[in-house]
Image: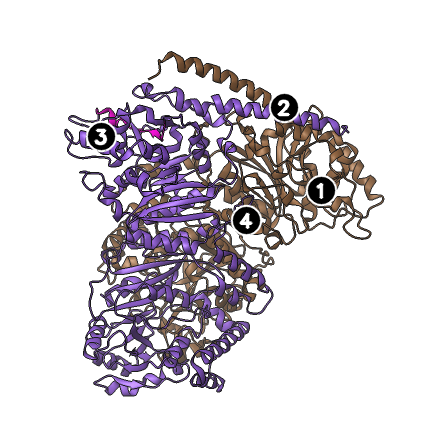
Chain colours: A brown, B purple
């Protein structure tokens, strides 16, 4: 047993030594002299990368704890938005500091990423958006042949685009993946000399040496030049040094002899630094390991722990050929498939920076009784799912006075319905998909592998990431409904196939009936069912009626749940030549066409049961008129029961919870619509069949 | 531009300084004095954990690069085997060194883990198994009330159980999760003084202080004592010091006054160290952050980067209440759901240590032509999937002369069939499930949430982890078939429901027909189909025939693929009172009962099509007799077409590839069975219907 005094004395001595050591490293550490001692002079020889720098003191320990780090990314379009999500996941996985993301976006990326971050609710991350359109004119005069287009060039304008009081920022391309804590990269700001303002990694190919092929004429650069996939910018100094004038003058000068930039902003950064080598701090190559086809990157790292940031800077992206590409792909796949919900973790040790809505949610969830009978229903209702709108490229429908978007929702087990649905409905669709992050990638491959689906550009797929115990059917419908961009919506289900002519017929009906988007009319599309999934689909009402008479088709759920569609009055529909009005009755749940701004679904209904019925009741309460269309029909295709419906059938507790939800909903309805809404409560209390 | 000489001189100076610094740290670094300076004397006061040690030089830099690290884990039973997989995933995710796992297992865990590691094919990992039964007698005399049972105590015998030339090992409980590189932990071996032989973290509760409740009498310990979830053992020194005599003497001594160990091996380790405090090196608390209910662990870490190893040492496991439990759960879920295939990454920088079969595989895959028409078929065929046998607890069927296991395979989209199947088949089942790691957890929750499934103990679920582009249907069947433990197997598909009496009827038939497991007989179970999934299932042949006559049921695929079952001769079956023989004909694919050692399925058939036909052909080639059972039947339940079948229907290329596979198969068949097998080739060349 040691006396108590000794450890303390030795501890103090150790602390003193530690401070001296840190000071020593700070002044003369190997990472520091990387930038200072190896000037551009050594750049044009062999690649003298240092294999041993990973043995140093971790630089992040030099940072004030919980310091806010700033990151800027330029992002435009659907595909880059998906890339940014993967990049951000890798960032968040390793980060230990609060982050402020500065996203320079077009309107597409902004819509996607704003919704995503809002619903992601990651603590200790702030996101600011900057409109790329405002800055385009500053770079659009530069002829450019790189695949990143105009947006690549926008990195040049960051010193003026970002807030004038922002002094430092790390700029990232959308095609990089982090394999370490970004704070270690941020720590290199401490190594900038008084004159340096740009931190860059050397370019890991011979491109700028100009000897790749005959007549290869790259932009001027110091030796191998630099790669701009990862940049440290001292914005304050760049502004002071007149960066804008500087790069514009250089670019104009080079463009006198070269016709265009080949590598966008990177060419211009290199040309500027050729003229002003004192501005640049050379960063260790491991902070931007470049995986283009002719990369020399493998000279950079000798073991996995050397890899800090991977840069997929080939147009081939993940199909690039490279000695260690499997390793890199695995790293990238890790984050592609990583459950983003798991990144909602608190940065403990730093002051709480959870978004206010996240804190309220935490509180509400914590107050639930885990042992209550309907706990899962309450939990699911409180859950705020992460949403990635328009996951795949999508073209806006042409502006028309009367147009209809088909709205539906699905999960992985209904994916095979999509091709058929596309053949039945040529019009725009807004679909909500309930998937895990890994399933989202399967979905992406599924669409890419399907000629039918990849040819369609008017189907918007909105991803809602799985979370919670029950299927949030009405929340999904609301997500899809909110994204419909036409005057009207056809509220359908994924296992229903409309008659091929329905899209045209609905638009014609809307026009003939002169239904403006303000008129409260619900057009009813009668529903039938087939027991065969190999059905010769009827192309007209006459064919449908023949199949009905032959016993091949049936009215929907005629055998187990006739109340759901009885008010549609199938007998009258047989004979009808013109639209006819019908009255609401208890449990009515027809498929309807509505103006886009119709009431939303009540999201308290989760899992199976009563989710559409409540919506139709609300339409009735708001005095919508129900009008059945004589030539419209849609047919339910058979499938195995979903897990949720199996559960409903087998569980008494599940049904009890559903009953409680219904009562709650009716009380709300009475509160909102007064005495007239009492009829729903009365209807509910009548003796019932299945429910 | 700097002259070339200067950087070199400065570089040398920097290197010298670095060496001095490392030496300084080695002798007096903060991690080192943690163990040396803070002896047990300070243990019984407040918890004086050091918050700043993460700022030190990473200790792994002191290790020889690519040093082989040894890890020992005691594991028994189904549930612990699943835990070990998650632990190993976290280990592999952060590791940078080759590993040698020493697994002390019961026969259940050995069967599971041996297959798992063999099929996982992770480079640079070696696994050795030690039979726990051989060492049980050394600890079974110790009365123990801890939930880990006898197996917990087995950690005591590691110095004698592990190879005598193994000097150092890290011992881990199955309920720990790594959040950092294990090499950093291994580096603490360098800090052992000459006398020290056990490295441990302090216990993070007041248990051993003995003041938790009235009459609480813990085993003797130094202050708060130590937790044995993570142990560094110098095996060489323990053997030399007579460890076995030491702990046995101590345990016997304590057991004179206390009736049993409460915390298994941990009580005994603590009692020994109370007597011999010089043996222990105290490790930083972050290497075993204990999440039991009354844990004081939060005094240990101040930020996420402090967390090195999380220990779920409460019987409540992940439901434990703790301030940061969400953070810990997320970390654990990360590895629970992590795609284990991604961990097959090479430890580049170290000599290649890929298993030989993995290297051959890599080579074969690399030789495939990515642009070939049937590339995906070839790729899938070469793929070696990771297999986790008996994922859930399973009881062996009682030994019987005639017994039948139902064999089938499925993926997530058929999960809802399991409950119904269980009600139709009370006998043993061997099911292969094709899932991702994340889906495996969904499956686990699904079974736990189902009273029907969780009550069954004779259903073995074998997980085959998804990999490759096509559904490996025959590989899955072979996995399930190989695990059947009864004399006979019923080779079924997951969407078929047998008549309720089938299990008893088959056993009776086997007995009556005196079918020994060596007789080459295939009992045919006639197949029908229902178009309704809400079918009143016929309980007898008479009821079935009535439904058939009523047009409610049909013979299987009568309309699109009658050849598949035509040889069963449904007309004859209607009247049959006794089993009758039938002849093979082209494309016959009945559901059959076979001896367990029947031919395997040909795994080249992947995706949809012809997978069962080939198997039946092979039975015929081996001169199996086909015997139709007069009272047996099974009914196909409707479901939406799988993705694979949709693809088959829509793709001409897919069908061409299938045709090529068939020809290849028939050539193999002729090679193996000679001229008689030519008939299959001829049969194939006849004009066909659908194919």
Tell me the number on the disc at residue A327. Answer: 4
Tell if the residue under mark 4 belongs to the same chain as the one under mark 3.
no
Q: Residue at x 78, y 43 (%)?
A: A219
Residue B379 pos. (x, y %): 52, 64
Q: CA distance from mark 3 to mark 2?
A: 54 Å
Element carrying mark 1: helix
Q: CA distance from mark 1 to mark 2?
A: 33 Å
* Residue B206 is one of the magenta-drawn residues: yes
Instruction: Check the image and report above or below for A659 versus A70.
Output: below
Q: What chain does mark 1 sit on?
A: A
Mark 4 or 2 closer to N-term?
2
Disc 4 vs disc 3: which is toward the camera?
A: 3
Q: Residue at x 43, y 22 (%)?
A: B33
Q: What residue sits right under mark 2 in the picture?
A: A28
Mark 1 or 2 closer to N-term?
2
Residue A689 pos. (x, y %): 24, 63
Q: Which residues are magenta?
A: B196-211
Q: What residue sits right under mark 3 in the picture?
A: B250
Element carrying mark 4: helix
Judge left or right: residue A624 versus residue A107: left
Q: What residue sits right under mark 1 in the picture?
A: A265
Judge left or right: residue B284 versus residue B65: left
Residue A224 pos. (x, y %): 73, 41
Q: What chain does mark 4 sit on?
A: A
Residues at circles 4 and 2 in contact by the CB criterion of under 8 Å: no
């Amino acid at each position: 047993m040691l006396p108590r005094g000794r450890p303390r004395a030795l501890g103090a001595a150790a602390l003193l030594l530690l401070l001296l050591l840190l000071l020593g490293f700070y002044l003369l550490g190997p990472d520091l002299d990387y930038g200072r001692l190896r000037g551009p002079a050594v750049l044009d020889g062999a690649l003298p990368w240092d294999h041993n720098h990973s043995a140093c003191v971790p630089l992040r320990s030099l940072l004030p704890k919980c310091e806010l780090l700033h990151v800027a990314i330029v992002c435009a379009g659907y595909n880059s938005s998906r890339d940014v999500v993967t990049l951000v996941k890798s960032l968040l996985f390793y980060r230990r500091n609060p982050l402020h993301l500065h996203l320079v976006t077009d309107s597409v990326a902004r819509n996607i990423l704003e919704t995503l971050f809002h619903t992601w609710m990651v603590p200790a991350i702030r996101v600011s958006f900057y409109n790329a359109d405002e800055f385009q004119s500053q770079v659009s005069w530069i002829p450019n042949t790189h695949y990143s287009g105009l947006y690549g060039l926008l990195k040049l304008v960051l010193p003026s685009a970002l807030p004038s009081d922002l002094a430092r920022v790390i700029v990232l391309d959308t095609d990089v993946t982090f394999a370490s804590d970004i704070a270690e990269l941020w720590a290199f700001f401490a190594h900038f000399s008084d004159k340096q303002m740009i931190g860059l990694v050397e370019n890991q190919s011979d491109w700028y040496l100009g000897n790749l092929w005959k007549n290869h004429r790259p932009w001027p650069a110091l030796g191998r030049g630099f790669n701009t996939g990862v940049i440290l910018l001292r914005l304050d100094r760049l502004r002071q040094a007149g960066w804008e004038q500087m790069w514009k003058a250089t670019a104009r000068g080079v463009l006198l002899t070269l016709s265009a930039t080949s590598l966008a902003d990177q060419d211009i950064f290199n040309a500027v630094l050729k003229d002003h080598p004192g501005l640049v701090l050379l960063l260790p190559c491991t902070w931007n390991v470049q995986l283009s086809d002719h990369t020399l990157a493998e000279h950079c790292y000798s073991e996995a722990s050397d890899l800090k940031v991977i840069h997929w800077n080939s147009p081939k992206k993940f199909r690039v050929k490279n000695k260690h590409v499997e390793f890199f792909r695995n790293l990238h796949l890790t984050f592609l498939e990583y459950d983003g919900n798991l990144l909602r973790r608190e940065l403990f040790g730093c002051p709480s920076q959870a978004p206010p809505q996240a804190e309220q949610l935490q509180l509400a969830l914590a107050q639930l009784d885990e042992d209550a009978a309907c706990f899962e229903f309450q939990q699911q209702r409180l859950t705020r799912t992460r949403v990635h709108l328009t996951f795949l490229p999508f073209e806006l429908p042409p502006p028309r006075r009367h147009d209809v978007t088909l709205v539906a929702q699905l999960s992985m087990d209904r994916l095979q319905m999509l091709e058929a649905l596309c053949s039945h409905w040529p019009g725009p669709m807004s679909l909500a998909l309930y998937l895990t992050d890994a399933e989202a990638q399967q979905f992406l491959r599924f669409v890419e592998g399907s000629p039918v689906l990849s040819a369609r550009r008017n189907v918007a797929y909105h991803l809602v990431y799985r979370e919670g115990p029950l299927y949030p059917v009405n929340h999904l419908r609301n997500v899809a409904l909110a994204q419909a961009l036409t005057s009207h919506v056809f509220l359908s289900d994924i296992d229903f196939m409309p008659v091929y002519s329905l899209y045209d017929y609905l638009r014609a009906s809307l026009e003939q009936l002169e239904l403006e988007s303000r008129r409260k009319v619900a057009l009813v599309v009668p529903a039938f069912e087939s027991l065969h999934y190999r059905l010769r689909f009827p192309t007209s009402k006459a064919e449908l009626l023949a199949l009905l008479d032959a016993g091949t088709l049936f009215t929907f759920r005629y055998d187990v749940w006739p109340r759901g569609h009885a008010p549609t009055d199938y007998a009258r529909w047989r004979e009808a030549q013109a639209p006819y009005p019908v009255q609401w009755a208890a449990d009515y749940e027809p498929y309807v066409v509505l103006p886009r701004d119709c009431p939303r679904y009540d999201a308290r209904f989760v899992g199976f049961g009563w989710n559409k019925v409540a919506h139709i009741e609300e339409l009735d309460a708001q005095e919508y008129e129900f009008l059945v269309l004589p030539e419209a029909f849609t047919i339910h295709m058979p499938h195995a029961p979903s897990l949720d419906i199996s559960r409903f059938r087998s569980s008494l507790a599940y049904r009890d919870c559903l009953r409680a939800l219904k009562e709650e909903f009716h009380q709300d309805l009475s509160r909102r619509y007064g005495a007239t809404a009492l009829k729903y409560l009365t209807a509910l209390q009548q003796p019932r069949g299945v429910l």
